[in-house]
Image (tube, grey):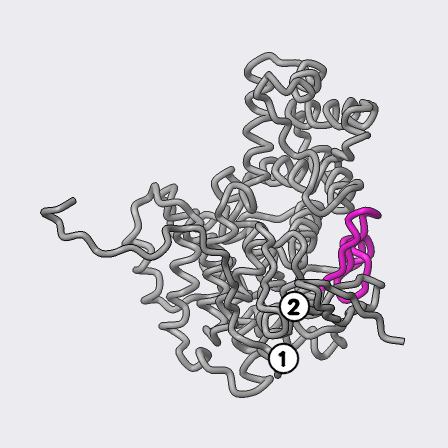
Amino acid sequence: MNETVKLIYRDKTFEFPVVTGTEGEKAIDITQLRSQTGLITLDSGYGNTGACTSAITFIDGDKGILRYRGIPIEQLAEKSRFVEVAWLLIFGRLPKQDELDRFSRRLTANAPIHEDFKYHFGGFPTSAPPMAIQSAMINTLACFHPQFITLGDEEAFEEAAARLLSKVRTIAAYAYRRSIGRPFIYPDPKLKYVANFLHMMFSMPYDQYVVEPEIEHALNQILILHADHEQNCSTSTVRMVGSSRANLFASAAAGVCALWGPLHGGANVEVLEQLEAIHKGGLTPQKCIEMAKDKTSGFRLMGFGHRIYKNFDPRAKILKASAEKVLNKLGIKDPLLDIAMQLEQLALKDQYFVDRKLYPNVDFYSGIIMRAIGIPVNMFTVMFSIGRMPGWIAQWKEQHDDPNARIARPRQIYVGPTVQDYVPIENR
């Protein structure tokens, strides 16, 4: 028997169907609410609103579960690589060997950017925010590859997805090189996705950066763990822009702009900056915990708690182990990692944090790993955008493949002045 929900308004009863997802999630289908009742819903921040149905990512925040296409994130982080996860998200299943090989060849072939494209970097000051460059250059890709503005078939889509996914790392590396006055380094077709990115970031002419396997694995994990996360701000932005039938490049560029916000993609930057401030300021982890509990202190402990997860962020568990391996491999004794681990241990034993389910999140450790690898703080959010690109592409494709998709057009409740007459300027 199909479930329904009854709404009583002005002595009239209206019934709306209940939609049940494959994992048991339930939602009230209110697509006919306004036409039947004249009412709309008001939900600031969309915390209780489902904007779509999706088969890409499942999250159970209460249990600390994250799955891509049904596969637990723990398995993917341990056994898979970023390119394979990208295929999984975009095309809905794990690739066969020939499919993965073909996609990898496409990524390799598309890593270089047009020689004329490089001159666009010269139009930015060296102090330009990398995320601004990233967004602008992704939009610029549409100018150099106009044949992919309209995608007519699956083959064209796969090629466009491969170009975007491959070139976004080249754009990021070139933006970094430009900011520090170093020459651009061409991609090496012999290297895999992550190793090639690090090569473009850190190699010098006649002195190639050699990527340690542990470092490559750690960065693969960071990208995998950020590859999709359901309908967050940037993903919803990609869908919002894509709903107008905007092309893939424009939609992804809009996602970068949304991710740029400090409340979204900039969280790991804030964690690292706070750890540095604690270290330089001589604050003890214990003192920080006490200040965080004191509402009058104005101090907020960054990297703890998550809007979705009311349990331990599963991504944080993976990156905690990864951070220890990376620092041991590089022989780095990072005082910030020591502070982070002490903060975690203290918080997990403190009833204040336990009662409020304030567990470490993914941002707590990702910045420490990238810092150890040598990626500067102003590139952290750019790294996030590279990792999130497969999810954005997958969400864009899912929306465009939906025959019932409509242009997004939220409603509002107007609270401004009622009707009034225009007053000539001499009478105001």
Graded by Cα atoms within 10 Å as few (under 14), some (14 to 19) or many (20 or more), the crowding at tag 1 reads few
Q: Confirm whether the magenta stretch covers residue 65.
A: yes
Give how far apart the Cα atoms at labels 1 and 2 are: 10 Å
- Magenta-colored span: 57-79
Q: Residue tagged by mark 1?
A: 402
Q: Mark 2 — residue? A: 52
Give the answer, above or below, for where 148 lies relative to 7: below
Look at the image and tell me in which quarter the N terminus lies. Answer: bottom right
Observer-nearest residue: 418 or 80? 418
418 lies above or below 3? above
Q: Nearer the viewer, mark 1 or mark 2?
A: 2
**Neighbourhood count class around disc 2 (C-alpha, 10 Å): few under 14, some 14–19, many 20 upward:** few
Q: How many marks?
A: 2
Q: For residue 357, which quarter of the picture? A: top right
Percent coordinates x, y for residue 140 in the rendering: 37, 66
Asked whether, in this view, residue 116 is left or right of residue 142, the answer is left
Name the secondary structure under disc 1: loop
Q: What's the amino acid at mark 2?
A: Cys
Residue lying at 55% horizontally and 39% vertically, measured from the top left: 374
Magenta-span inclusion, residue 234 = no
Indicate the quadrant where residue 344 lies: top right
Q: Is residue 195 visible?
A: no
In the displayed structure image, the side of residue 87 where residue 125 appears, left or right: left
Location of the C terminus (image quadrant): top left
Out of 103 and 187, give the one closest to the viewer: 103
Q: Residue furthest bottom?
A: 152
In this rendering, position of residue 317 left or right of residue 108: right
Point out the tag, 1 or 2, that comes first from the N-terminus: 2
